[in-house]
Amino acid sequence: MNRLESYFIAVVFAHLGVVLVHTIAHLWLQILPAPPDTAFILAVILIGPVATLPILRFNRTLAAALLAVVMAAAFVYGFQSHFLIAGPDQVAIMSSDPWTLVFVATAVGIGVLELASLAVAVALFGRSIRNPWEYPERPR
């Protein structure tokens, strides 16, 4: 396993952890998404990144491409729902409940981790395309 693969695994698990805390904040603040949003959140934000982990072992290129797609989609969805569109989970209109700070901090953290995951996935994809059989690269 190389360094990029280690980063790949780390950002996926960090993202999962922050998403789970954000979910608890959603529940505590009674901000429940609509059924189509729930389906997207489950499939793309929760399951998608974790599903790339077993794929990484056998096909780095596919795992990196899949992670890039799900993290880009997750970032666009989260950014628009938490920061752009007025709605129950926009961070600017939160209440004074103590869980509000957790909600806002995890919303920002998720976005940062999604962008970091996207960067790692693109870097790993590029490296796996240049070196598909994982031969050691020549030093430059």
Image (tube, rainbow, N blue to C red):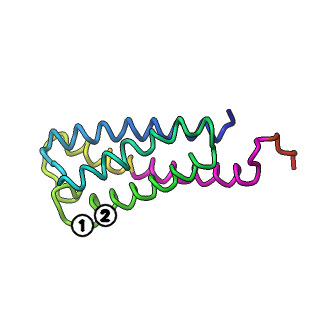
Please state which of residues 18 and 100 is positioned toward the viewer in this rendering: 18
SS for callout 1? loop
Please state which of residues 80 and 72 is positioned toward the viewer in this rendering: 72
Residue contact at pointers 1 and 2, CB within 8 angstroms: yes
Pointer 2 residue: 80
Pointer 1 residue: 85
SS for callout 2? helix
At x 23%, y 37%, the residue is 24
**Residue 117 lies in the magenta stretch:** yes
Find residue 100 and report its horizontal and vertical position in percent. 20, 45
Q: Quadrant of the N terminus?
A: top right
At x 76%, y 43%, the residue is 133
Q: Amino acid at mark 1?
A: Ile
Residue 138: name its quadrant.
top right
Q: Which stretch appears magenta?
A: 111-134
Q: Amino acid at mark 2?
A: Gln
